[in-house]
Image (spheres, coloured by chain):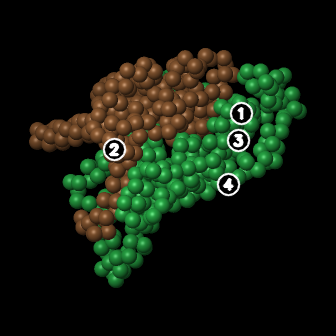
Amino acid sequence: MKRGVLIAVPYVWLLALFLIPFAVVFKISLSDIALAIPPYTPTAKDGIWNMLTQLDFENFVFLTQDDLYWKAYLSSLQIALISTILTLMVGYPMAYAMARAPEQWRPTLLMLVILPFWTSFLIRVYAWIGILSTEGFLNQFLMWTGIVGEPLTILNTNTAVYIGIVYTYLPFMILPIYSALDRLDGSLIEAAEDLGCSRLKAFWLVTIPLSKNGIIAGCFLVFIPALGEFVIPSLLGGSGTLMIGKVLFEEFFSNRDWPVASAVAVILLLILIIPIVLFQRNEQRQAEAEG
Amino acid sequence: MNRLSPFNVVSLTLGFVFLYVPMLILVIYSFNESKLVTVWAGFSTKWYGELLANDAFLDAAWVTLKVAVLSSTIATILGTMAAYVLVRGGRFFGRTLFSGMIYAPLVMPEVITGLSLLLLFIGIGLDRGVLTIVLAHTTFSMCFVSVVVSSRLMTFDQSLEEAALDLGASPFEAFRLITLPIIAPAVISGWLLAFTLSLDDLVIASFTSGPSATTLPMKIWSSVRLGVSPEINALSTILIGLVTVGVIAASLASKQAALRAKRDEQQAARTA
């Protein structure tokens, strides 16, 4: 009985405020736009039969006809993928160095990685505006050293978006990789080296495969939220930066077209289901391996 | 393993420079006299004065604090319950769905969560304001709490609970007297995480709040969209300072707790 209550309370909360809202989005994505507020007319007014006979896919048809949406989905995928790879390239060497650092330094290093994560996301993205703008600190520095003669245009381009994503999501990449490397048995690498592997080969054949779960978890933790990112492309990206999170936000708040915004969300969710399920499997496998 | 090659040192140094220089610049230039944020014109604290005289910011800060305290507290209770159910609950109907609903919000893009909650609130006719933001924040942060707490529940020795039950404690007493004190650090860090997530959130709050409630990130957002401003730099510095003090204090406290636990264990081992 008590166990029932314990299960039911969080369960019902999540059903009501996580799962049912998705059903609502799905329903509205199949509705017609109307000028009244709320700006949609429910398609399923008179029961399920009507809903089935009057299903209205016109919002989805609209999405396929307008280039903007296709391009936004594709370019979000591309931006998220490139940023994930870049984050991995920056994060792995850091996690690796942290795991090899003397034991007494590790808590401090770990805290230094976590600290930015506790700091406001918005502020960390905002900090880059002053650095990347034409008269910003990076250009001042580059001109001062004479590396470039003219200021580079970085702000309001995709490059700025990559920098922003790598910067803000770096802790999510470092932490799972670090925890995988931290558990790694150092004698395995020594054994590989004793058996004639070069250090590089031992790294490639032993360290990388054994930290695989950390790499996978880190990549998903960066890729999935980056795909729907809104703040970074809006602040750092330019008019040419198409990302679906930004499109959805604008469709909703500027155009006030709720059914189309919902349809955009439904498709984004469908794209995300595969990586989310894979991520969850990876987490569960890891949890079972530890437990 | 304790050999740092030059390559390791370089990657750590560059990595931390990358992580900290942007924030450092923000802090330094919040004390800049000039309105132009990229040109240094002498030391001044005038932007802090202007910030504190700005009622709109103070109001927003108050709303944000209220939302964060309420949502993180409810989220901690619900998240701890969920973690307990997941780790100790055994099998029950719809367990896979339940664990899916715990993990999915961790990575769900905020635009989707925000949009779906807003449409729900409108659908059931709930007025948007502080209440709806609290509901929204509780929902996603309880999942973070649950992950933090369940990782602690998984590692601790279950025989302690069983011993309490064998000695006649009711399940609730066993939880209150044995389990809760042991998982307390995880519960507290879960609360802190939920609190920060709520303080930080822009997207979900924008969707779920109404005209009556503007949170600090929403206020920052509307002024940041117009470009860099020294007032925002000052505000950022205050927030960065608070977080730094908080994180350092929390880590010192947990270090102390770990030391105390170790001492207790040693003492227990001696007396046994």
Residue position for label 3 = A264
Report if the CB atoms under discs 1 and 2 are less than 8 Å apart: no
Q: Of the residues shown, which amino acid type is indicated by label 3?
A: Val
**Helix or strand or loop: what does disc 4 sit on?**
helix
Residue position for label 2 = B40
Residue position for label 1 = A255
User: Chain coloured green: which letter?
Assistant: A
Residue position for label 4 = A74
Report if the CB atoms under discs 3 and 4 are less than 8 Å apart: no
Task: Tell if the residue under mark 2 belongs to the same chain as the one under mark 4.
Answer: no
**Helix or strand or loop: what does disc 3 sit on?**
helix
Label 1 and label 3: CA atoms lie apart by: 13 Å
**Circle 1 crowding by C-alpha within 10 Å: few under 14, some 14–19, many from 20:** few
Q: Of the residues shown, which amino acid type is indicated by label 4?
A: Leu
Label 3 and label 2: CA atoms lie apart by: 45 Å
Task: Tell if the residue under mark 1 belongs to the same chain as the one under mark 3.
Answer: yes
Task: Tell if the residue under mark 3 belongs to the same chain as the one under mark 4.
Answer: yes
Q: Nearer the viewer, mark 1 or mark 2?
A: 2
Q: Of the residues shown, which amino acid type is indicated by label 2?
A: Trp
Residue drawn where x is 53% and y is 37% of the image = B225
* Residue at the bottom extreme, as displayed: A196
Residue drawn where x is 51% and y is 60% of the image = A85
- Quadrant, the N terminus of chain B: bottom left
